[in-house]
Image (cartoon, rainbow, N blue to C red):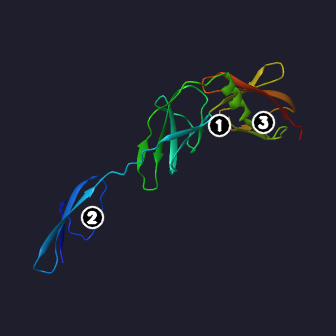
Amino acid sequence: AGYLWNDGSTSEILNVKEPGIYWVSYNENMCQYRIDTFVVEREHLDPVINVNARELGTTTSYSTYQWLLNGNEIPGATDSIHTVTENGDYQVIVTNGNGCIDTSDVYKVTDVGIGDIRYLTDQIYIYPNPANDFIYISAPTPIGITITDVLGKEIRIPKDASEIDIRALMPGIYILHITDKDGVLIKVEKIIKLQK
């Protein structure tokens, strides 16, 4: 017949957004009043990082992911799997379907070496090549690009390394210099601009 919640509201439903103890008083049959108490706890996601060679993942699936290296967000690292390219402390921030957010414990990587750079370069794909208008680059981590002519003269440094507009280039052979986020050269690739 009538409701009174601990926050003073009188509706039949109380929307709870924070953990805590909540109570409601209500009139059961016009003669007796009842009080019920509810304990609301925060949902714990407890993301755990698992490892498969150089790929980090989680033991449970989530709605969103943001990978961290040494406490800083890794730009573009929002997939369920992250390929390790350097030593450091890795974590992942996850969100579930209810909008709850949690951060994993640190997973320390200390054994990345030269062989791992080769592993990274094998995962960088440049296509189409040859091309007329655009060249696309798929890479598991953020990269930088410099385009030079065959003599090493710098032609362009595109801001977007995933889609490179080559329409303004003259037909011919060019060299792509691909660097990691710290500017270290990790791959050199020849590209061909076709004549239209």
Q: Which amino acid is tagged 2?
A: Leu
Q: Position of residue 134 (x, y in %)?
A: 77, 40
Q: Which amino acid is tagged 1?
A: Pro
Q: Answer with left or right where residue 177 lies relative to residue 108.
A: right
Q: Position of residue 138 (x, y in %)?
A: 70, 39
Q: Answer with left or right where residue 124 lies relative to residue 5.
A: right
Q: Which mark is residue 127?
A: none
SS at badge 3: loop
Quadrant of the image containing the N terminus: bottom left
Q: Residue at x 65, y 37 (%)?
A: 140
Q: Which of 179/26 is in front?
A: 26
SS at badge 2: loop
Q: Residue at x 44, y 36 (%)?
A: 105
Along the polypeptide, which appears first: circle 1 or circle 2? 2
Please give the residue where the numbered disc 1 appears in the rendered image.
140
Q: Position of residue 107 (x, y in %)?
A: 49, 32
Report, in whole angstroms, how far the alpha carbon at label 1 lies from the one at label 2: 46 Å
Label 1: few (<14), some or many (≥20) within 10 Å? some
Q: Which of 183/168 is in front?
A: 183
Q: Is residue 129 above or below residue 111?
A: below
Please give the residue where the numbered disc 3 appears in the rendered image.
166
Q: Which mark is residue 14?
A: 2
Residue at far left of view:
31
Which one is closest to the eye, mark 1 or mark 3? Answer: 1
SS at badge 1: loop
